[in-house]
């Protein structure tokens, strides 16, 4: 395994459409996934897409803790959401289930130091293959849905600032206190 360099906004690999993975069981795909997971853990990212490590293939990885989702979505008086386990999706497809959009803060390992408020669909269904080639199908809401939309956007060459509708909220995380939002946190 290896910790890989992370491409930053401006590198062409981040603005091109990634190619589908033909054989999820291929050894080089397995190696790439292991390296992505190690890189994501090292960078303490919520998610990572293969183009971010200079591999323009349709692979994403993410982890959503229930506690984090509850913080982001606001407690709704129900039991805290369960963790979404560390998930690798190959050739993911996102289907929008609601026209309802929600605004939330996002950050990206390829846009270091910044964060911004991004509108995302509040409910989606996503599907893709896990590294064993088995299909995963899930419905996602709120922060979970946000993370998946952010990561899958990377596969189409889209970074979150392009989804923003109010660029006045694109700020340096280090200036967060000046915004009076010390509660928010970076990815
Ligand atoms: Ni990102």
Image: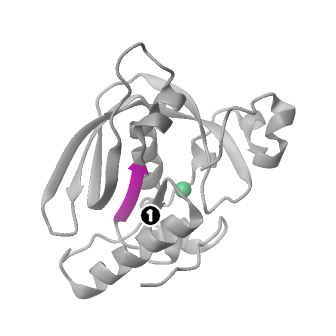
- The one nearer the camera, 98 or 87, is 87
- Asked if residue 3 lies left or right of residue 155, the reply is right
- The one nearer the camera, 29 or 46, is 46
Identify the residue at horizontal 38%, vertical 60% (top origin). 61
The residue tagged 1 is 49
Instruction: Report x, y in % for residue 26.
Output: 21, 83
Identify the residue at horizontal 34%, vertical 66% (top origin). 58
Secondary structure mainly formed by the magenta segment: strand
Instruction: Report x, y in % for residue 62.
Output: 40, 55
Secondary structure category for the residue under label 1: strand
Instruction: Report x, y in % for residue 82.
Output: 33, 36
Residue range highlighted in magenta: 59-63
Q: Is residue 81 above or below residue 14?
A: above
Residue with the most extreme left position: 134
In reply to whether residue 61 is colored magenta, the answer given is yes
In reply to whether residue 186 is colored magenta, the answer given is no
**Quarter occupied by residue 111:** bottom right
Identify the residue at horizontal 65%, vertical 68% (top origin). 8
Q: Is residue 99 above or below residue 160?
A: above
- Asked if residue 54 lies left or right of residue 107, the reply is left
The answer to whether mark 1 is within 8 Å of ligand 1 is yes
Instruction: Report x, y in % for residue 77.
Output: 41, 13
- Asked if residue 136 lies left or right of residue 78, the reply is left
Rendered-image quarter of ligand 1: bottom right
């Amino acid at each position: 395994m290896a910790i890989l360099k992370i491409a930053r906004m401006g590198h062409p690999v981040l603005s091109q459409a990634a190619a589908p993975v033909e054989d999820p069981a291929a050894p080089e795909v397995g190696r790439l996934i292991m390296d992505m997971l190690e890189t994501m853990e090292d960078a303490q990212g919520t998610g990572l897409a293969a183009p971010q490590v200079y591999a323009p293939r349709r692979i994403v990885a993410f982890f959503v803790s229930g506690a984090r989702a509850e913080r982001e979505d606001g407690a709704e008086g129900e039991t805290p959401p369960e963790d979404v386990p560390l998930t690798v999706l190959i050739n993911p497809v996102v289907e929008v289930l609601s026209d309802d959009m929600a605004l939330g803060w996002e950050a990206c390992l390829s846009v270091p130091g910044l964060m911004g408020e991004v509108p995302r669909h509040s409910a989606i269904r996503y599907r893709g293959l896990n590294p064993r080639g088995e299909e995963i199908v899930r419905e996602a809401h709120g922060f979970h849905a946000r993370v998946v939309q952010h990561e899958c956007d990377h596969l189409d060459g889209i970074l979150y600032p392009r989804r923003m509708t109010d660029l006045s909220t694109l700020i340096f995380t280090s200036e967060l206190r000046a915004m009076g939002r010390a509660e928010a946190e970076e990815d």
